[in-house]
Image (spheres, coloured by chain):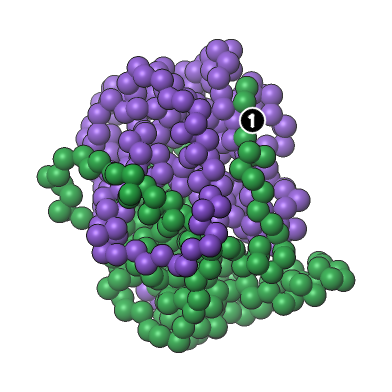
Chain colours: A purple, B green
Amino acid sequence: MDSFELQSPPAFDPAFCARLDELFAWRRDVRRFRDAPLDDAPVDELIALACRAPSVGNCQPWRFVKVKSPAARAAVRASFAACNRQALDAYEGAQAQLYASLKLSGLDRAPVQLAVFAEPDPVAGHGLGRATMPETVVHSVVLAIHTFWLAARARGIGVGWVSILEPENVTQALGVPPAWRLVAYLCVGWPEEEHLDPELVRHGWQARADFGRFVSEV
Amino acid sequence: MDSFELQSPPAFDPAFCARLDELFAWRRDVRRFRDAPLDDAPVDELIALACRAPSVGNCQPWRFVKVKSPAARAAVRASFAACNRQALDAYEGAQAQLYASLKLSGLDRAPVQLAVFAEPDPVAGHGLGRATMPETVVHSVVLAIHTFWLAARARGIGVGWVSILEPENVTQALGVPPAWRLVAYLCVGWPEEEHLDPELVRHGWQARADFGRFVSEV
């Protein structure tokens, strides 16, 4: 990253902005991975970029755990299976059928798996900016995850964010400090296919609304 | 956005990735804005892009409120002033002096101000993916904010995320549904200056650590 240090501010031209917009549009939550390995080096590059994300008070609360051991992966898969079964039980009829047909994680084949935690009360940052909104610490970790995700997609690497998990089970299974808060479990690898529309739109679970619906003025 | 619909998946080349990395590196939390207006049109374009962010179950829980009325802006500034005074009181000696010298928001001059809320229990998404981790709804809004931020910076527009606020005061002052959760208050406009290093690094509040400190393996 130090190659940036002496540069003057970049000006991003309209062509770059158009490509960036395409990146936002084509970034997908990937659940179908090719059976191909992904080295540590590109993953470390992505983590280094993720650590460029903004954080409240510059407290850098992100903690990345590469989940490699078969035992740890099995524990995560078991948590997903239990939570997914419970979730299915909460639906009925056609919606239950549709839910059961969705592929909601790539835990089966993703070559790289990362658990991303927040250190909820980091010394770094000295509390700045989080006295009245302490949730900004966890939000900083979300910003890092999103940075990782976009940078990965630009390199052709797919990322899937799995949230159908019992956070405490995962925290325990990975043996991290019990105070750490699980923010995301990421499946990372080479996607089998690329899509512009989200899987949940394509399979009729939830359509996208026009952005105007989400804007008001005061 | 519909211009994307018929395209085939883009391949992003190394030159784009390098520019994207520069964007991550130069995106700053901006607190010093030029005294120049910013139209609604580019802001709406940025909000539309933000709504391309991933959301749990595709529930699209983001709610953007353009804060334009002088009364609403005054209420937000008052909340910031009170919270910032309280925060200062919690520091002592040299740290208190340093804190007092920091400029922590652009509320005084940002031409555009946006309060970004989460609808905490949206009908959309039908609960998918958030049974065991309901905080993913708010996290989805954070992803939209980050998308807005990056797209803005690429266009030369600065964004500052203000969190030194009492969320309930802001929610009340803006007259939004009381169940909505304030995620961020954004100051948006043309930055006075561009920096590679975060303001809190430059002024000696909190240095950045090497990414390797944040990675482990299991």
Question: Relative to the observer, which residue lies in front, A154 or A73?
Answer: A154
In screen coordinates, is A19 left or right of B176? Answer: left
Q: Which residue is drawn at 28% across and 39% down?
A: A198
Q: Which residue is drawn at 72% across and 32% down?
A: A177
Q: Quadrant of residue B41?
A: bottom left
Q: Would residue B58 be visible to someone looking at this image?
A: no
Q: Give the x, y percent position of residue B145.
A: 44, 58
Question: Relative to the observer, which residue lies in front, B147 or A41?
Answer: A41
The residue labelled by disc 1 is B216
Q: Is residue A178 above or below residue B94?
A: above
Q: Give the x, y percent position of residue A144.
A: 52, 47
Under mark 1, the amino acid is Ser
Q: Give the x, y percent position of residue B100.
A: 74, 76
Q: Give the x, y percent position of residue A120.
A: 68, 45
Q: In which quarter of the image is the C terminus of chain B?
A: top right
Q: In which quarter of the image is residue A97?
A: top left
In screen coordinates, is A212 left or right of B207? Answer: left
Question: Relative to the observer, which residue lies in front, A1 or B110?
Answer: A1
Q: Which residue is drawn at 41% across and 44% down?
A: A151
Give the chain of mark 1. Answer: B
Q: Residue at x 29, y 60 (%)?
A: A17
Q: Is residue A155 above or below residue B122?
A: above
